[in-house]
Image (cartoon, rainbow, N blue to C red):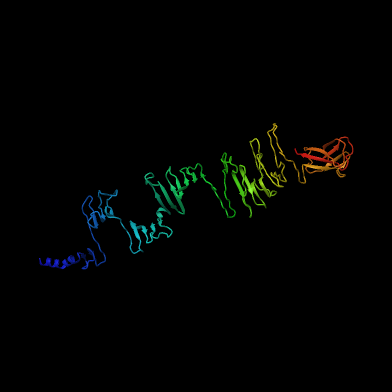
Amino acid sequence: MYKRLLFISIIAPAFSLAQNVGIGTQTPGSRLHVVDSLANVRLLLQGLGSGSSRAAIELIAGSNPFNYLQIAKYPTSTLTTIYGMSANNLSVIQTGGNGGGLLLGAGDGVSPVIFAAGVSERMRIIADGRVGIGTPNPSFQNDLHVHNSDPALGIDVSIGISNSITTDANGRGARFRMSGANLLIANNEVTGSLSLSTNANQRLLITPSGNIGINNLTPAYLLDIEANGSSAVNINQTGSSATGMAVTMPIAGTNNRGIFVTNTANFSPPGNYAIGIHAVTGSGAGISLSPTSNYGLIGECRNPSGGYGVLGVSNSPSAQITQAGVVGINYSTAASSFGVIGSSSGTSGAGTAGTTDNGAAGLLGYAGPASTGPAIKSVSIPGSSRIGLELENGAIKVSGTNRMVFRHVCTAGNTAGNETIIPNTTLANDPNDLLIVTPYWDGTYLNSAIGVYFEATSNTWRIFRQDMGFMPLNVKFNVMVIKQ
């Protein structure tokens, strides 16, 4: 009895003075202060019951029994569930129903908060708030840095998002994936689309079938753009040896179109065109085209020193043409091949129109030095009375050194007897030509009927007097040559 009283007399002051309990210390600084001289403090709570029995520490603030912080360990084979999860062999840190928030932090402002599983660190929150998953050193460029360096998984890291429709099955929902050096953003749902938005408006949509809509929520084509009052596509290429837009068509196929443009508004008001090409080929050039009608294709070049509005070339360009509104060149050896084709089904107008307001030509047809075909050809249905060429309020003018209409003058060098030789290179000594010859009077009178013929021995065309009289010198004739 004496020993017990002595023990009580020794420890009583500790309870009565501060109401603190010290284990391993005579100066407890809190209600329970445990000190181990070997620097290894351990508080052991062990639950040996069965069923839902657990070992736990509950810290209650105030008199409310639900205002607590609990640190608990559930045994194996427990039947309890917590937040819908089985508590079987589960360790829990949680607050009570009135316990407020739960704070995990490192108060020194330098040390990180670390989460681990197994024997490896899995997530870390460093002092400035950046989060690293799979890395202890999240990049300064990322608020969330997910990293995978496990060789067994390959160089592959992904973030998946799913909901009640997509479920959490493997591969379902949305996925952000870094595979090697490639970034993949995917919606793996069969009926799901992928969209990007700005300013609370959807800007880009990729449908489940792969159609892409820009400002278009129902794209009907692989790329379907809806532009309201602005250019749909603008390409600004400042490099060299580059192509602004390239369209490559397959070798096989039917009814393929490289570029197909439809302007459904080109009826009223005027000033619409399906394809407008404003070519700026040098300094000082500017866009000044303001169409007053409607067009399918407009080609304009504003550079006064050279360039083309539209250039159509097969195999190679022409060195003889340096500037034109439209150039069509065909070097194909196949039959029925053309540089430019113009077709019209209206009661007026033209398939191809060329306009000029100065001394230049509105339409130019160029035949190369080795060409055996015409520079311009008009074809009508055989056997019909269709008009091949019509001149409305205009004249025919021929120019150059080898004109198809020219004036022949009888001189001592080309005239003998009743005939005169026509030495014009337009004829090219071709007996199949058709010649239309009329006398031209400017002072020397020829009172005789004339005719023309091809003299086969000398391969020359000749004009002769039908009365067999002498052909006077200085007589002039107008000659038109029609090739066959």
Identify the image quadrant of residue 257. Answer: top right
In the shown orientation, is residue 143 left or right of residue 47?
A: right
Residue 155 percent across, percent down from the top left: 43, 54
Q: Quadrant of the C terminus?
A: top right
Q: Quadrant of residue 1?
A: bottom left
* Residue projecting furthest to the left: 1
Which residue in the rendered view is the most extreme toward the top? 383
Residue 331 percent location from the top left of the image:
67, 44
User: Of 424 and 289, which appears nearest the observer?
Assistant: 289
Residue 111 vs 157, above or below: the answer is below
In this rendering, would 34 be left or right of 262?
A: left
Instruction: Residue at 38%, 61% (x, y): give it.
Output: 128
Can you see residue 456?
no
135 above or below 215? Answer: below
In the picture, measured across the screen, residue 376 lies left or right of residue 208, that is right
Residue 277 image position (x, y, % from top left): 61, 47
Residue 413 percent coordinates (x, y): 86, 45
Query: Foreground residue, 48 or 213?
Result: 213
In the image, taking residue 183 as reference, residue 86 lies left or right, namely: left
Residue closer to the observer: 292 or 409? 292
* Res. 424 visible in picture: yes
Single out the residue that lies furthest toward the front: 269
The total number of labels drawn is 0
Indicate whether 47 appears above or below 258. below
Image quarter of residue 377: top right
Which one is in front, 269 or 152?
Answer: 269
